[in-house]
Image: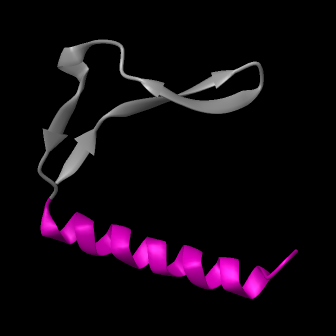
């Protein structure tokens, strides 16, 4: 389940989290299991790359 609770906006060259524009924008959406598997695999890859990079 994907839950939308905040938005990401670029302000003054920086990325900042903020509230969604309307109460109706806050929502939940079901994700297919195949997508969940892909996202978990991507997160694992990011973790390995981060560990391999060390302090670089």
Percent x, y for residue 8?
51, 31
Q: Is residue 49 magenta?
A: yes
Report the magenta stretch's main SS. Answer: helix
* Residue stretch rendered in magenta on the structure: 32-56
> Where does residue 11 sit, x and y in percent of width and height?
68, 20
28 over 1 or under it: above or below? above
Residue visible at 39% across and 31% down in the picture: 6
* Number of marks in the rendered image: 0
Residue in view at x 27 percent, y 75 percent: 37
The colour scheme used to paint the residues is: one colour
Residue in the image at 47% along x and 80% along y = 44
Check the picture and name the quadrant holding the C terminus. Answer: bottom right
Name which quarter of the figure residue 12 lies in: top right
On the rendered image, what quadrant is the N terminus found in?
bottom left
Reply above or below: 1 against 9.
Answer: below
Q: Residue furthest top?
A: 22
Task: Name the residue located 79 percent from the left edge and 82 percent from the top edge.
Answer: 54
Q: Is residue 4 magenta?
A: no
* In this view, 26 is above or below 41: above
Looking at the rendering, which quadrant does residue 41 occupy? Answer: bottom left
Specify whether 37 is left or right of 33: right
């Amino acid at each position: 389940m994907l839950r939308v609770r905040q938005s990401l906006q670029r302000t003054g060259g920086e990325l900042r989290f903020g509230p969604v524009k309307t109460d109706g924008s806050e929502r939940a959406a079901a994700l297919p299991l195949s997508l969940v598997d892909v996202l978990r695999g991507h997160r694992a890859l990011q973790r390995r790359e981060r560990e391999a990079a060390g302090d670089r």
